[in-house]
Image (cartoon, rainbow, N blue to C red):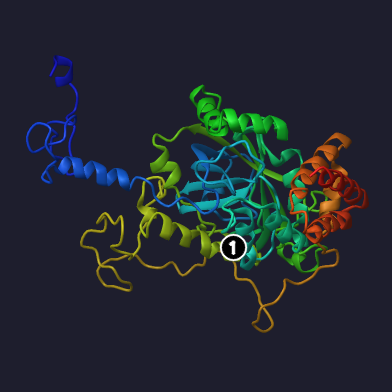
Amino acid sequence: MTAQDELRPTLTTEAGAPVADNQNTETAGTGGPALIQDQLLFEKLAHFNRERIPERVVHARGAAAYGTFTVTGDVTAYTRAAFLSEVGKETETFLRFSTVAGNLGSADAVRDPRGFALKFYTEEGNYDLVGNNTPVFFIKDAIKFPDFIHTQKRDPYTGSQEADNVWDFWGLSPEATHQVTWLFGDRGIPASYRHLDGFGSHTYQWQNEAGEHFWVKYHFKTDQGIKNLTSEEAAVLAGTDPDSHQRDLRESIERGEFPSWTVSVQIMPAADAATYRFNPFDLTKVWPHADYPLVEFGKLELNRNPDNVFAEVEQSIFSPSHFVPGIGPSPDKMLQGRLFAYADAHRYRVGINADHLPVNRPHATEALTNSRDGHLYDGRHGRRKNYEPNSFGGPVETGRPLWAATAVTGTTGSTEAPSHSEDDDFVQAGNLYRLFGEDEKARLIGNLAGFIAKVSADRDDIVERAVENFRRADADYGRRLEAAVRELRKQK
């Protein structure tokens, strides 16, 4: 051991005992077989075998950073959330970006929605806002979510993603037409995580101190500007630098170039919902800004990288069921399913005590529950009683709900959401198509046609259903797509 080594801390076992030799396995004589008494060897190998937890079924591939949310506009007339209570107030945050369909080892530069999962470490507990870089989604009811994801993942027989499965499902689910138009347009492949917008996507409830409630949609506008990749650029980048987005985010923060987003909200008075021209709780629809303009109220900046990707990015958990006083859910049927599904996924994937991990536990307050034991439990409660009510000074309920009650009528049953005057699956997709410039339309048609043309030669019915949905959104959209697909399929 050198003099310099003597100044360094001592390597230990997991139990804290000093390690004498970390270079050589203990054996039965020189060159002999290993001994079972070499517990350092077995401890290291056993830990190594367990270093990977099950990856997320969706949003497996991601990167994240800590940051600061600062209130820039007064919204106290709409919500009593403490972290939004005054202009200038700052709250620590953790934002995880991700792709949706790919596995943990997939490339960043691919055509896929990007997850935008944001944790606010507020003084009233953690508030998780789990959204995407698109304001809409493919389906409107959570009961269809497993089926949808199965079409995007590997086929159980071929082991590959199959165009037949993707377009069969989308063709039979016309509600997907709007989001598919987003996905295959220019914004379908962001150039980096810094150059995309974020959306809460779902409709949420805000409630003020007076008890009034409002329906809201969140918007995060990138201050770096939108920047995208073409399909050709992305194919090269994904092959040469699969970690492109993760590296770009990390290195920009290391350089002190902190990415930021201007945060706004659309606010709908509760009474408007029943008669609004679209179902305001339909995740496949947007609220046009002309109806409900953006109200700016904050700035989000990312300014600190995680120290350990596994501990802080992979083990981070986000659930839309994590609300704080003054913010709550809406009747959005996709959101209602996610309130259960996300938290349940993390209980399975990370463990029942995942909320105790440093990245997930509250940073500005303390969680006081009666839950005990289970995987990862650290004994933090000591001798405190684990039931309520009790007469030993344990935590007590407030009696004040976090959000306003929502009136319901009718009988129970498996029913579609109520239809509003302009509800259909195509009008907003057509509106989006007509907003595109001619060059963007051409790229959209090329991207869609290239994928649809991969459908099996004997399944023209799948192709026809897929194209018909885009034709119903806009006649020109359908005509051009049909011609492009026909030409490509002739070449197969």
- Where residue 256 sits in the image (x, y, percent)? 52, 23
Quarter of the image with the C terminus in it? top right
Quadrant in the rendering for residue 439: top right
Quarter of the image with the N terminus in it? top left
Q: Nearer the viewer, residue 459 or 202?
A: 459
Q: Nearer the viewer, residue 290 or 378?
A: 378
Q: Nearer the viewer, residue 488 or 418?
A: 488
Check disc 1 and give the amino acid type: Pro
Judged from the image, the secondary structure of the residue bearing numbered disc 1 is helix
With respect to residue 171, does 183 lie above or below?
Answer: above
- Please give the residue where the numbered disc 1 appears in the rendered image: 146
- Where residue 413 sits in the image (x, y, percent)? 65, 81
Asked if residue 457 lies left or right of residue 118, the reply is right
Residue at 19 percent of width and 40 percent of height: 41
Quadrant in the rendering for residue 12: top left
Quadrant in the rendering for residue 18: top left
Asked if residue 106 lies left or right of residue 16, the reply is right
Residue at 80 percent of width and 42 percent of height: 444
Q: How many marks?
A: 1
Asked if residue 339 lies left or right of residue 474, the reply is left
Q: Nearer the viewer, residue 33 or 470?
A: 33
- Where residue 467 sits in the image (x, y, percent)? 84, 54
